[in-house]
Amino acid sequence: MYHLPARYTKEQILAVRTAHRKAHTWQDRAALGTVRLLRWGMDLVSGYHTRPTNTNTISKSHLMTEEKWITRFVFLESVAGVPGMVAGMLRHLKSIRRMRRDNGWIETLLEEAYNERMHLLTFLKLAEPGPTMRFMVLGAQWVFFSGFSLAYLISPQICHRFVGYLEEEAVITYSKAILDLENGYLPGWEGLQAPDMAIKYWQMPEGQRCMHSLLLYVRADEAKHRDVNHALGNLDQNTDPNPFAAGVRVQVRSVASSAGRLQKLKTQHLLNIAGRFMVLHI
Ligand SMILES: [Fe+2]
Ligand SMILES: [Fe+2]
């Protein structure tokens, strides 16, 4: 059931931009506030500083090196693999419990978890985490898995919005690392070949198999997670089909061609969400 990620073209991975969805409701603000709080805590604990324009204003020990970036990626990706699996599992159990179909959400959510785990495994090929990091990952997983599971049972809509905002931050983080690499601050990565498993997984073409390309591919995935989760957060969690599931796209089209005006508007709205996504990131 797992598919390879989309085969991005060079133009597509270069076209990815940071983006922010404005918080409109109290649910949006709760999700955004939680993400900002987590980011602040994580930056504080890990001593993360982005490179200022004037490097004299920051101590050398605070500058991000190749090793610090990888440590940050490993920790973030170990956390990022949790939401899709939890959401997919809970929707799977709900479908069984209520003896009802899931409208195509589970596959997309599990694919997201699989994709995040591939990010983690790729970065682990570049650095071996020490005992402290392993302990932090263990603790973070326990806390985040418990907290997110409980939150998803209470409000899946807020949880998808939360993941959407979390992924906005992921796109920002990878964009900053890419910029550091382009500006020559990460000489150890210049000319470094991406691990073989990454080349196979993303089907990276000849000439686009370096560390810079790898970061562009990972960032494109994060942008995809951002858009998918924000879109899922807009939908009715119980009745709307997942517009990103291949089968549902076909189904929705056929419903749209035969249903009444109200249903047509709703299905068209779903197709628009999926269509916008496909244009930007697939
Ligand atoms: Fe990721
Ligand atoms: Fe992600």
Image (cartoon, rainbow, N blue to C red):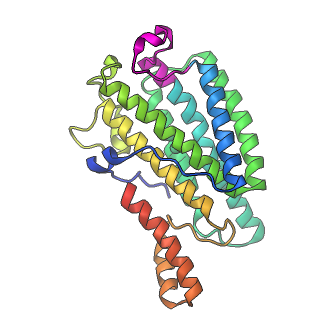
Residue 173 visible in image: yes
Residue 237 in the image: state x and y as whole percent: 67, 65
The correct choice, above or below, for 216 with respect to 95 in the image is: above
- 207 left or right of 74 in image: left
Q: Residue at x 78, y 55 (%)?
A: 154
* 97 relative to 9 in the view: left or right: right
- Residue extending farthest to the left is 207
Compared across the picture, whether 5 is left or right of 183 comes to right
Q: Is residue 150 above or below residue 273?
A: above
> Which residues make up the magenta segment?
48-71
Query: Measured from the top left, where is residue 244 in percent x and y?
Result: 49, 64
Q: Front-most of 153 and 232?
A: 232
Dividing the picture into quadrants, the one containing residue 186 is top left
> Residue 65 occupies which quadrant of the picture?
top left
Residue 246 in view (yes/no): no
Image x and y of residue 245, in percent: 50, 65
Q: Quadrant of the C terminus?
A: bottom left
192 or 3, nearer to the observer: 192
Q: Residue at x 58, y 34 (%)?
A: 78
On screen, residue 37 above or below 246: above
Measuring from the top left, give residue 111's x and y in whole percent.
52, 52
> Looking at the image, how many numbered discs can be counted on the residues?
0
Name the residue rendered at 33%, 39% in the picture.
Answer: 199
Q: Is residue 74 magenta?
A: no
The structure residue drawn at horizontal position 68% and vertical position 28%, both measured from the top left corner, is: 138
